[in-house]
Image (spheres, grey):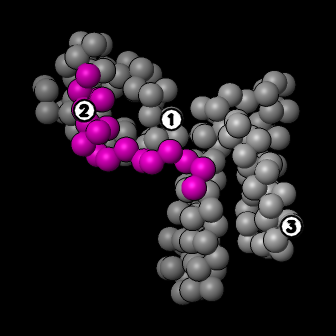
Amino acid sequence: MSLKDKLTEDLKQAMRQGDELGRSTLRLVMAAIKNAEIEKRRELEEGELLAIIAKEAKQRHESIDQFERGGRQDLVDREEAELQILLAYLPEQLSREEIEAQARQIIEEVGATSPAQMGQVMRQLMPLMQGKADGKLVSQVVKELLAGRT
């Protein structure tokens, strides 16, 4: 069963069970997927679907930070619940050590020796990390590794 089919089935299940939070969260994800498909004029691949779900999860993380600063615990709780629903569809996130190992391998393949070559490394590394790691963390790791090589 494809990820899109699983999302659709889970949405139907949430509607049958009267799960308002699950229903609204999954509807938002399905709408984001549909918009991306319309924009690209084709069905999305699994990696692209994961990227959309990861983007939605990232938005929840940012909202949680904002609501915590604003002292809105009720909204923090809702965003955290939505985040848990989204995380169930994402593959387990890579640890910093796993990202570092992949980054070192790509740096060797590319032959990068300075931070000026970060773009070359990121172009090869990000497709491998899609949906498995936060882009900011990947970028930070690559930057640190290249800075240490100068």
Q: Position of residue 39 (x, y in %)?
A: 81, 31
* Residue where numbered disc 2 is placed: 101
Can you see residue 28? Answer: no
Contact, mark 1 vs mark 3 (Cβ under 8 Å):
no
Image quarter for residue 119?
top left
* Residue where numbered disc 3 is placed: 16
Q: Residue at x 83, y 74 (%)?
A: 18
In space, the residues marked 3 and 2 are separated at their CA atoms by 44 Å
Image quarter for residue 76?
bottom right
- In the figure, 114 relative to 60: above or below? above
Q: Badge 3 local density, few (<14 within 10 Å), some, or many (20+)?
A: few
Q: Position of residue 146 (x, y in %)?
A: 22, 29
Q: Residue at x 43, y 43 (%)?
A: 133
Q: Badge 2 local density, few (<14 within 10 Å), some, or many (20+)?
A: few
- In the figure, 16 relative to 110: above or below? below
Q: Earlier in the sequence, mark 2 or mark 1?
A: 2
Q: Please indicate whether residue 85 sits to the left or right of residue 100 in the image.
A: right
Q: Amino acid at mark 2?
A: Ala
In space, the residues marked 2 and 1 are separated at their CA atoms by 16 Å
First to last magenta residue range: 88-105
Q: Amino acid at mark 1?
A: Gln
Q: Please indicate whether residue 135 sits to the left or right of residue 31 in the image.
A: left
Is the C terminus in the top left, top right, bottom left or bottom right quadrant? Answer: top left
Task: Choose between 41 and 4: the one closer to the eye.
Answer: 4
Where disc 1 sits, the SS reads loop
Q: Residue at x 44, y 34 (%)?
A: 129
Q: Nearer the viewer, mark 1 or mark 3?
A: 3
Is the N terminus in the top left, top right, bottom left or bottom right quadrant? Answer: top right
Q: Amino acid at mark 3?
A: Arg
